[in-house]
Amino acid sequence: MNSFILTLVLLPLLTFLLISLLEHRFSINAYGLFNICIFIVTAMALALLFMLFFVQDSNYKVEVNWNWLTINQLNLQFKLILTNLSIVVLFIVTLITSIVQLYMKNDHTSDKNHHKILALILFSTFMIILTDNILIISVFWFLISFGSFFSYLNLNRLSSQNKDVNNFIIPFTGDILFLVATLIIYSQTTTFDLSVINETLRSTKNAPFAVPAWSILIMISVILKGAHFPFHFWFRTALKGRLVKSAIIQILAIILVPLYILIRLYPIILSAVLVFWAYYIGLAMLLYFTIASIHKRVKAIIQFSLLGHSGLIILGLSTFSNQAIINYLICFMLFSILLCLLLDFLFEHGLRHKSQKEYKDVTLSQLVKNTDWSPFLSWMFLWLTLLVVGIPLTATFIAKIDLYTSIFQVTTNKAQLWGPLIFALIANILIAFYIARVSLVLIYPPGRKTNTKPRSGFGLSHHHYLALVILSFLGLYLFYTYPHFNPLASKTWLNLLVQFPLSKTRLPLNTSTLNLVYILILVLSITGLCGAWFVVIKNRQFPYFLKIRFNDLYNLLLRGIIPENYFSKFIVLPIKSVVLRTKDLEEKIMGGFPHRGMEIIVKKILYLNNKICIRINKILACNSRSPSRPIQYLRNSNLLIVSLIYLLIIIIGLIVVLI
Amino acid sequence: MNQHLLLINLIIPLIGSIFIFLIPKRRNDLMKSSVSTATGLQLWIIIQLMLNFNPRYSGIQFSENYSWIPNLSINLFLGIDGINLLFLVITALIFFTITLLPHIKKLEKKYFYILFLLADIGLCGTFTALDLFLFFSFLGLFLFSVFLLVLFIYNDDIRAIKSLTIFFPAYIVIMIGILLIYFQNGATSFNILTLAQQPDQNVTLQITGMLLIFLGFAPMVPIFPFHAWLIATFKQENPLITTIMAILMTKIGIYGILRICLPMFPQAINILAVILATFAIINLFYGSINALSRRHFQDSIPYLILCHAGFVLLGIAAIRSGAAGNFNTILMALTGALQHSFNYSLIFFILIILVYYLNKQNIDLSPENHKISFSDLPVLTTILVITLLSLVGIPGTAGFISQLLILVGAYNTPVIRIFSIIFILGILFPIAFVLKNLYNIFYGYRIQASQRHQAITSGKFLLIIPFILLTIILGILPHLTLNLITPSLTRLISAIM
């Protein structure tokens, strides 16, 4: 078994060396195929291992020790530990990598460096996931920075005069700070072994004075290397180039690895620092999701949504529910790769003839211009939305419930964590909003007139869409919550969650909290989805709606006038304005100003308000009218791969339910 | 036979130089081959020494002691331990490789070869001499022959020659320091081992002696204000002098501090360690910021050397923990310093040779006139990338373990800790330098096909392969050298404490 682990870790390294040494011997396709085989074999082996040993006994553990160097006290040893946590993360990493490699198998014709860099990053990631030595983590994290940098250079070789390269100094600064933290930890505990450090901290009553120092340093290094606010701009640099190629490497390097390292180091970080961090990351996360909701560039949307989700995971961690976030991390990896694959498909088929510069800053409306949707693609996006929002029967739903209940549970004990909880709840609306907005803008382009026959979906109009979303949510919610609808519900959620091997050390839950969480998540998700539907589909009404509200406010505050018919003024008119789009409503409200000068000012303000509203509408709904051009359908192989991911997310959900 | 290997090591180049002196002027090929033979034999002897070296024994091995001037108790005392073995290895390796480089033919002068071999004798003598007077004489031989070599090759560059004159005052300062040591100990012995066993207890005198010797070796290390010679040397295109000066001269500086300053002035170095650490930080920041700001890759190499000398100085400064300090911490830092001085010689030798080849192919590594590209010169760029990565201590390369040892050792030393934190933050600049150059490599324009084949198929290019292999092997199996170093350093440190 021990040699098996070593082989597993060394497989990507072997790939890296083979491709580097035999560069000119074989064709690039052969290397691509070799790479794919290696990844798939690794993933299969891990899955088998998991089934054979870890499902039976969740405390099963395999250790490999290799003493590298001993100089008196300094003892450097490669101690690799395979636990159920590490095996699941390893499996997901290899799986998404092999999926992406399969998806791109025809596109590697001129790029063997990609295989090399991917193998290097994967090797480093494996080492970080398996090792128990903080120095090894620090060293391989450093190597990952280089891999990420090489990937950037490789993908952007053609574009000279690229000044963004300077941004890569940020992750390296993070590496150095982490190294300082490692040295501080070593000087206090005289060991690099994480488990020993943990025990030392637990056994001593007075924690060493350096704990705050290393906690803050680790925190800053994660902010730098995970591209969190205010250093988020270097993620944009890293994502340049072909979307899928950069995404797979950078998602591993910038999102997954920092998160995993945090999960490992969480016990040695001071709790006060974590609480502070929960607030910081919570606010930053809201910022990311807001930007993802209003941005028009596709890559920026991907960047900020990834950062936002990673922020949510860190928030979960900061509120001391580190076990709960693993589920969400896995789902997040799957659906973010799925989003990247789908968007990459649109990029490649819609914008192939575009120049490099245009390719870099593609906006949603540009994608819309070049898209004539196949029903299949529409459904893909629709289901992607539901997956990210997390409908029942999918893994995301379980993960989300898991995460939110843990945060709730902790909040009842620690009053200072109410803030992060509220951030997380707001984030739930924003997640639903941003993903629904992207899908809706792509499926129902705003330029298209609503009265024409809809061409997307299986003849579905947007009203059907909304009804479908809400009904599926409600129906499945009922199915899951009430025992007489669902035979599985005889087992309570509590039991199901505890049985999942990753959730062993969960806090005890009560049913009322769970129900509260269900309802909150449901309401918030539907709010977000409806908001997106409202903004994108009903986009024309949006400025008028805001304008009327503004006028009412003006009348109330400045003129002291309460509308004669309060009900009609505040409730009926806005709804009418939305539904009927009556432009003359404006005149109704404006009637009867007492003073000429005041009227001019008000009209000016109204004019400004109108402009702002139209601007907001343009941004949010990507409002641009242009004829659409037909594109090819998804190729069969891509179709298979995308379907595979959907299946996976659903299967994971089912496994959790059925275990 | 094994007992006299060190003496034979010195005699072989001497015989070689006499032989060359007797050869007629027109027989250039014979001269060239005899130089190669002499240095090759030397390398073979050093390998023999390494194979027969007992790594568990901490004392002096292969010692040879002959009385030279009995009235002044000066002996011809040679010997090696873990400290100087690595320096000998790198010297022999570099001297042998230089003779195989193609440019030597162009010089085609008898004096040149003789001076080259004399420099070799001087350097090997300096590293093996265990008598202060002998050490001083060999150092003089080396400095003088290198100076003449510079005069001989760069006779039109006054600036380079001027900058080298700094070694003569340094030489005199070292002499005064040595005389101070000699007379303080009752003028009975120049034997380094004897002197180290009974250091003078007078702190003021120790500090004076330490400052004198340290100032003498400062230009050789090199330490910040005394580094002008290094930059002037790198302005030249010929890698011969550059290599000898830059790499081997720095070895003398570090060896001098380790061999003379540490054992003979233990209390002084305990007090002055803070100054060493300050110089280390200045070296790192000044060197790396300058390297970063140079347009041409060639110009930045001397600054990088300066920056890595900073690493070694920080390692030596960890001796500050002194009598009350932690033995293991000091050992770690010193082991790292010694190992690093060996490692970066390997790395810089590769870099210098690469730059030489690039110059020869008219390939310039500056951003505007940049003509090297990853896809066109895969071998060359791969080597360049490996070398650049080992400069910042990527795991798997030799730089990693030595830098780590230095940083861990320095961090665990109470007063030096704050210096080490500043130092670690300063490592960002070398990283930035490496990133900048990787960027240049990957964004290169394409070179012409004819040039491509020339650069790759040049057989001499293979000469640096052993150095690269060594860099990688020592990165993966660092105990190969660490096992040689550690016992001797343990003895040294226990003597100080």
Image (tube, grey):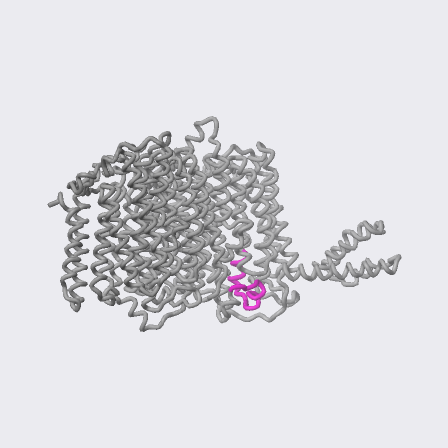
The residue sitting at the front extreme is B71
**What residue is shown at x 51% (from left), y 33% (from top)?**
A507
Q: On the picture, is B183 further left or further right than A118?
A: left
Rendering coords of residue A350 (x, y %): 51, 68
Rendering coords of residue B100 (x, y %): 22, 61
Q: On the picture, is A441 further left or further right than A95?
A: right
Residue A15 in sight in this render: no
A353 up-or-down from A505: above or below: below
Q: Nearer the viewer, residue A474 or B309?
A: B309
Any magenta on residue A367? yes
B214 up-or-down from A72: above or below: below
Q: Nearer the viewer, residue A4 or A229?
A: A229
The residue sitting at the left extreme is B1
Q: On the picture, is B28 further left or further right than A68?
A: left
Quarter of the figure that contains the C terminus of chain A:
top left
Residue B246 in sight in this render: yes
Please identify the dominant SS of the magenta region.
helix
Rendering coords of residue A653 (x, y %): 48, 46
The span shown in magenta is: A360-382
Rendering coords of residue A427 (x, y %): 59, 47
Among the 4 quarters of the image, the one containing residue B2: top left
The residue sitting at the top extreme is A205
Q: Nearer the viewer, residue A491 or A409?
A: A409
Among the 4 quarters of the image, the one containing residue B273: top left
A221 up-or-down from A634: above or below: above
Q: Nearer the viewer, residue A136 or B121?
A: B121
How many labels sit on residues? 0
Any magenta on residue B284? no
Quarter of the figure that contains the N terminus of chain A:
top left
